[in-house]
Image (cartoon, rainbow, N blue to C red):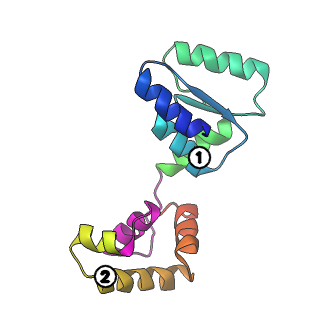
């Protein structure tokens, strides 16, 4: 079991417990998965002893301590890039891909055919100049379009 799953289980059993993740990982997916699982803070392992003590103090006072790079990442995620090249439907399909939905699931949720989903995905790939779902997701996240 990883720390994210453990956090989720602890928060289910003891919702009032505050959890600070201390890890080597600085990628946005792990940060957001940890916070979504219920972590109240996120520090990287390069935090020194004083920073950990300060983080514990912040938690007690109701704060959500984060390493500076993590805090910038979180703030940046709220700044969606408004110059995206996508139509609203393409952006919805791209969001669904990011969530891991299948073409069939996307078609059902938007009440369209799978061919319509494929059409939108083809347009997304063309606009991003990529050839795979993984590359499309990576590039869209990098540009804060999703």
Q: Quadrant of residue 19?
A: top right
Report the span colored magenta. Answer: 79-103
> In the rendered view, would you say 131 is above or below 48?
below
Q: Is residue 85 magenta?
A: yes
Q: Which SS class for mark 1?
A: helix
Asked whether the viewer can see residue 146, the reply is no
Q: Secondary structure at mark 2?
A: helix
Closer to us: 102 or 51? 102
Q: Is residue 76 magenta?
A: no
Seen at 53% across and 13% down, the residue is 60
Quarter of the picture containing the C terminus is: bottom left
Residue at 69% across / 16% down in the picture?
53
**Farthest left residue?**
111
Residue position for label 2:
114
Expressed as whole percent of the image width and height from the top left, the position of residue 124 reads: 45, 79
The outermost residue toward the front is: 1
How far across and how far down the image is residue 70, in percent?
62, 40
38 sits to left or right of 43: left
Q: Earlier in the sequence, mark 2 or mark 1?
A: 1
Q: Quadrant of the N terminus?
A: top right
Locate residue 71, reporting x and y percent.
59, 38
Residue ID at (64%, 50%): 27
Query: Residue 109, located in which quarter of the rendered image?
Result: bottom left
Residue 30 numbered mark, or none: 1
Q: Residue at point 23% right, 78% down?
A: 112
CA–CA distance in space, label 2 to label 1 = 31 Å
Mark 1 surroundings: few (<14), some (14-19) or many (≥20) residues within 10 A: some
Which residue occupies the foreground of this view, 71 or 1? Answer: 1
């Amino acid at each position: 079991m990883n720390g994210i799953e453990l956090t989720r289980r602890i928060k289910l059993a003891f919702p009032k417990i505050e959890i600070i993740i201390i890890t080597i990982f600085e990628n946005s997916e792990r940060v957001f998965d940890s916070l979504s699982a219920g972590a109240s803070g996120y520090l990287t392992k390069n935090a020194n002893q004083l920073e950990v003590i300060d983080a514990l103090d912040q938690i007690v006072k109701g704060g959500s301590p984060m390493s500076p790079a993590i805090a910038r990442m979180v703030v940046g995620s709220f700044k969606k890039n408004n110059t995206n090249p996508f139509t609203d439907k393409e952006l919805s399909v791209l969001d669904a891909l990011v969530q891991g939905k299948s073409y069939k699931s996307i078609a059902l949720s938007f009440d369209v055919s799978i061919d319509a989903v494929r059409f939108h995905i083809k347009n997304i790939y063309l606009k991003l100049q990529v050839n795979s779902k993984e590359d499309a997701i990576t590039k869209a996240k990098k540009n804060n379009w999703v």
